[in-house]
Image (cartoon, helix red, strand yellow):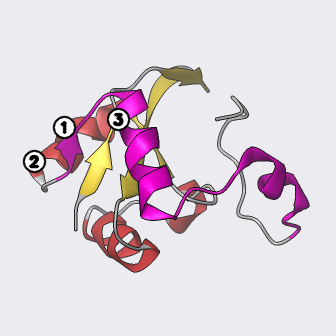
Amino acid sequence: MTVLIDPPSWPAHGTLWSHLVSDASYDELHAFAGTLGIPRRLFDHDHYDLPEDRYAAAVAAGATEVTGSQLIRALISSGLRVRERDRHEDTHSDTHVHGHGH
């Protein structure tokens, strides 16, 4: 079980954002985010959007640095990836921090 993070490269709201995912379970991901004090509102269907100023803290807490493509492949392999079309069908989704369509 691993929590993965990609480099901050998605611009929105005056900063760059990373994605934080688990390759095992949402429970693992939510627990990890909770230890960092990351608010649940930053959870976006299958990942947390994390501002660049929190990147180093996530890595220090044990998140594994990977490229964006490695992160997506791990998320798909885990079975936890929520497809884009399924995101739009989910009327109970959490608030999106940014709409870059990933």
Q: Residue at x 78, y 55 (%)?
A: 87
Upstream in sequence: badge 3 or badge 1:
1
Numbered disc 1: secondary structure: helix
Q: Nearer the viewer, mark 3 or mark 1?
A: 3
Q: Residue at x 22, y 60 (%)?
A: 2
Residue 98, picture quadrant: top right
Badge 3, how many Cα within 10 Å: few under 14, some, many 20+? some
Which mark, residue 70? 3
Q: Amino acid at mark 1?
A: Ala
Q: What range of the chain is rendered magenta?
A: 63-91
Q: Residue at x 46, y 23 (%)?
A: 16
Q: Quadrant of the N terminus?
A: bottom left
Q: Is residue 97 left or right of residue 93?
A: left
Badge 2, how many Cα within 10 Å: few under 14, some, many 20+? few
Q: Amino acid at mark 3?
A: Gln
Q: Is residue 82 magenta?
A: yes
Q: Is residue 91 left or right of residue 97?
A: right
Q: Determine whether 50 is above or below 43 in the image.
A: above
Upstream in sequence: badge 3 or badge 2:
2
Look at the numbered discs 3 and 1 and tell me whether their residues touch, using CB distance below 8 Å.
no
Which mark, residue 56? 1
Disc 3 from disc 1: Cα separation: 19 Å
The picture places residue 74, in percent across and down from the top left corner, at: 38, 49
Circle 2 residue: 60
The picture places residue 31, in percent across and down from the top left corner, at: 32, 76
Q: Amino acid at mark 2?
A: Ala
